[in-house]
């Protein structure tokens, strides 16, 4: 039964997978009409012919394209839209394209998830991204009143195992930098900078002279270069600017750009090709373990953890929005629990001493 709210509207509530959902209407007649169709759908398993919902006539492909135009263009960055279009083209439209929204069932979604997993070539995270996009589109249909229930609601994600990461030891880092310094100064500058600041590749590519504060020895990180769009975004992956300190080596590397114009790129436009073509061969010559450019960020964080740096400081300098992302490095930290419970004895001893002084006094 529709209930009147304090605001004078009418609310219909129903339960989906143990969770309450609700929708409000200005007129009671609209609320009653919605509730009638909801009950019909629950009992019969399909929509009433009287229900005036776009989900009855609109196909998934039509709705998805509209979602990309109205929702995606406003709330998503260009690189995410490119990924979403690819997911729709390769996976969701072949599965649901010509189906009307009301015809897509939970069974269809579970079957798609199972089929994608059975292919054996997609990672769990990729499958979760595919199913997540389907969930987002169908949820928007519910919010817009074109569906009553999201069939993807509550669908369990595939568990993503934590992936091991690679990093250089401190000896490997120093050996590579010493070897590369006299053989390829351009490559040395980029690698030494990355391994001593922990910046992402796109952040390094977008760095300008104006982002460097030589007086306070700080780097302002607030842009990111996107390989997909070939553009510089005015934000980082975490959407938050951060400050990274410069050590002596970084100051030395950046000294040659100190007199450039503020908008000048620090490492130039050819950095990507420099890394792609010359980094791996130099690793072989220096006889160090092969790692990727992003592994330099792992190396930076791992070395900070080894030196006993606070996990909160590492999180801040890396720009992680979630602490658990940073915690993956903390198994390398010195054991800071050693002797922790000794403080209990020390504290008790102090109490006894104070007690004796009170009685003696």
Image (cartoon, rainbow, N blue to C red):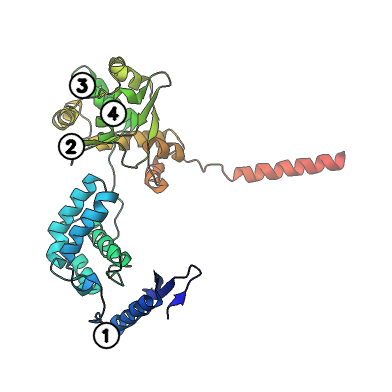
Mark 3 nearby-residue class (10 Å; few <14, some 14–19, many ≥20): some
How far across and how far down the image is residue 265, in percent? 25, 25
Select label 3 or label 2 by which is in front: 2
- Residues under labels 1 and 3: Cα distance? 70 Å
Q: Quadrant of the N terminus?
A: bottom left
Place residue 45 in its image quadrant: bottom left
Front residue of this view, candidates 99 and 315: 99
Residue 270 at least partly seen: yes
Tell me where residue 216 appears, x and y as whole percent: 43, 21
For marks 4 and 2, give the CA distance.
15 Å
User: Residue 230 bears which disc, if any?
Assistant: 2
User: Can you identify the residue that label 1 sits on?
Assistant: 44
Mark 4 vs mark 3: in front: 4
Identify residue for label 4: 207
Q: Mark 1 near mark 3, Cβ–Cβ under 8 Å?
A: no
Quote the CA–CA distance across marks 4 and 3.
16 Å
Quadrant of the rendered structure where residue 132 is? bottom left
With 122 as the anchor, is 36 left or right in this view?
right
Cα separation between marks 1 and 2:
52 Å
User: Badge 1 local density, few (<14 within 10 Å), some, or many (20+)?
Assistant: few
Which residue of the protein is positioned furthest toward the bottom in this rendering?
Answer: 44
Q: Secondary structure at mark 3?
A: helix
**Is label 1 in a helix, a strand or a loop?**
helix
Q: Earlier in the sequence, mark 4 or mark 2?
A: 4
The mark nearer the N terminus, 1 or 3, is 1
The location of residue 248, given as percent across then percent down, is: 37, 19
Disc 3 target residue: 186
């Amino acid at each position: 039964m529709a209930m009147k709210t304090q605001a004078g509207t009418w609310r219909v509530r129903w339960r989906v997978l143990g969770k309450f959902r609700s929708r409000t209407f200005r007129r009671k007649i609209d609320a009653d009409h919605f509730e009638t169709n909801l009950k019909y759908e629950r009992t019969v398993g399909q929509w009433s012919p009287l229900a005036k919902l776009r989900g009855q006539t609109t196909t998934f492909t039509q709705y998805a394209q509209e979602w990309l135009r109205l929702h995606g263009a406003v709330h998503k960055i260009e690189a995410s839209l490119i990924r979403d279009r690819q997911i729709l083209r390769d996976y969701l439209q072949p599965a649901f394209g010509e189906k009307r929204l009301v015809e897509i069932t939970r069974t269809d979604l579970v079957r798609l998830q199972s089929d994608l997993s059975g292919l054996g070539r997609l990672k769990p995270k990729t499958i979760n991204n595919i199913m997540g996009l389907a969930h987002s589109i169908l949820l928007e249909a519910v919010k817009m009143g074109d569906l009553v229930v999201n069939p993807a609601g509550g669908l369990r994600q595939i568990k993503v195992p934590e992936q091991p990461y690679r990093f250089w030891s401190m000896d490997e880092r120093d050996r590579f930098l010493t070897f590369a310094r006299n053989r390829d100064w351009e490559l040395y500058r980029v690698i030494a900078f990355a391994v001593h600041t922990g910046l992402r590749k796109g952040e390094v590519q977008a760095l300008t002279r104006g982002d460097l504060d030589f007086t306070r020895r700080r780097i302002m990180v607030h842009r990111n270069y996107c390989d997909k769009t070939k553009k510089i975004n005015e934000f980082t992956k975490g959407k938050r600017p951060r400050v990274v300190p410069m050590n002596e080596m970084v100051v030395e590397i950046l000294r040659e750009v100190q007199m450039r114009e503020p908008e000048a790129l620090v490492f130039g436009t050819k950095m990507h090709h420099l890394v792609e073509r010359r980094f791996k061969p130099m690793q072989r010559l220096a006889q160090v373990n092969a790692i990727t450019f992003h592994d330099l960020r792992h190396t930076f964080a791992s070395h900070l953890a080894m030196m006993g740096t606070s996990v909160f400081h590492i999180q801040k300098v890396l720009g992680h929005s979630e602490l658990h992302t940073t915690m993956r490095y903390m198994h390398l930290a010195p054991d800071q629990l050693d002797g922790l419970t000794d403080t209990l004895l020390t504290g008790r001893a102090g109490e006894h001493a104070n007690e004796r002084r009170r009685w003696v006094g």
